[in-house]
Amino acid sequence: MKQLLILSGKGGTGKTTVAAAFIKLSQAKACADCDVDAPNLHFTLNKDIPSEQTPFYGLNIAHIDQKQCAQCALCLRHCRFGAIACKDGVYVVDTPACEGCGVCEAICPEKAVSLVPDPAGAMMLYSDEKFVFSTARLKMGKGNSGMLVTEVKKRMRDSAPPETSVAVIDGSPGIGCPVIASLSGVDMVLIVAEPSLSGMSDMERIIKTAGKFGVGMAVCVNKYDMSEANTRAIEAFCKGNDIPFMGKIPFDPQVVKTVNSGRSIIDVDCPSGQAVYLIYNTVMSLLGKRETLT
């Protein structure tokens, strides 16, 4: 099973819109949304109720047993993160501030403090005999996003129907931990760029990041006609760095209406959908060539 990852250097480039279109065009039997901080691919795929939902536990956090606590305040004085407070004479843990370092547990003479698993989010799997969609949602302020993304991809692979040839993965924007975890083990990355100065800078950053993994890359530009000069600059950058340029998608007011109705741009006759169709064929051809080479 080949894995195609779709990324962008910044949010708002249309990455998820392109990913949803690729899933429809390829009739993918396996796909995943690895943007665990703000997943929304399920809206376009019309997936409401997961067939399986599992809690995700991040780092352990401190818990104070009030029956054991002698109110000596040692935990409060030694916590470097300000995660312990005294409220109405009771010592409590500020869960979002706790880093799980374990100093409070080690310093407590009454053994009233322990480190316990912290529910940091939830993993959702939508599956049947012919299709699997894996995603997750991280709670606000929680870490371990990379670990959660790794688990999302693993669940997709383990549940994919045997005949699955290509899996499409919608990654997170930027170059943080979830992106790095998304890049691991994939066969090709399609970067959706935006023809703005910030978009070009962010595109170069994600290209450098993906390059560290030795993954095959390709680039397309969304809303190219917002700045044709910057689009030409992106094409020149790709040519100068031997990165295949897949094509250009025009600005299309119909995209917002289509996505808000829970459909993909492939489901309607529109300029952006036609452009993505051409890009899809070019990307699949390139992915097939990479399969031959490897």
Image: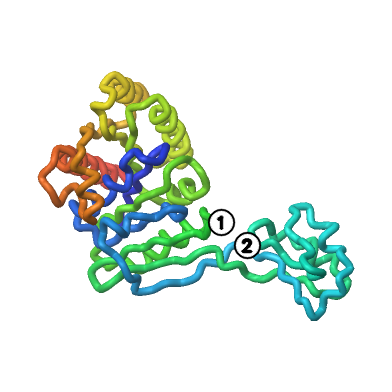
Which residue bears the numbered disc 1? 144
- When asked about the image quadrant of residue 59, the answer is bottom right
Q: Are marks 2 and 1 in contact (CB under 8 Å)?
A: yes
Quarter in which the N terminus is drawn: bottom left
Which of the 4 quarters of the picture holds residue 48? Answer: bottom left
Between 233 and 254, the one nearer to me in the picture: 254
Question: Is 111 on the left or on the right of 213, as rendered?
Answer: right
Picture mark count: 2
Residue lying furthest top in this view?
A: 229
Callout 1 crowding tier (Cα within 10 Å): few <14, some 14–19, many ≥20: some
Name which of mark 2 and mark 1 comes first in the sequence.
2
- Amino acid under label 2? Leu
Q: CA distance from mark 2 to mark 1?
A: 8 Å
Q: Is residue 209 above or below residue 183?
A: above
Label 2 sits on a secondary structure element that is: loop
Q: Name which residue lies at 29% across and 49% down.
A: 19
| Residue 92 percent across, percent down from the top left | 74, 67
Task: Give the image location of residue 248, x and y in percent.
Answer: 23, 32
The type of residue carrying mark 1 is Asn
270 relative to 155 in the view: left or right: left
Q: Quadrant of residue 29?
A: bottom left
User: How far across and how far down the image is residue 275, in percent?
Assistant: 17, 37
Q: For the view shown, which residue lies furthest in the bottom direction? A: 67
User: Mark 2 sits on what residue?
Assistant: 59
Closer-to-camera residue (210/254) = 254
Circle on res. 283 = none
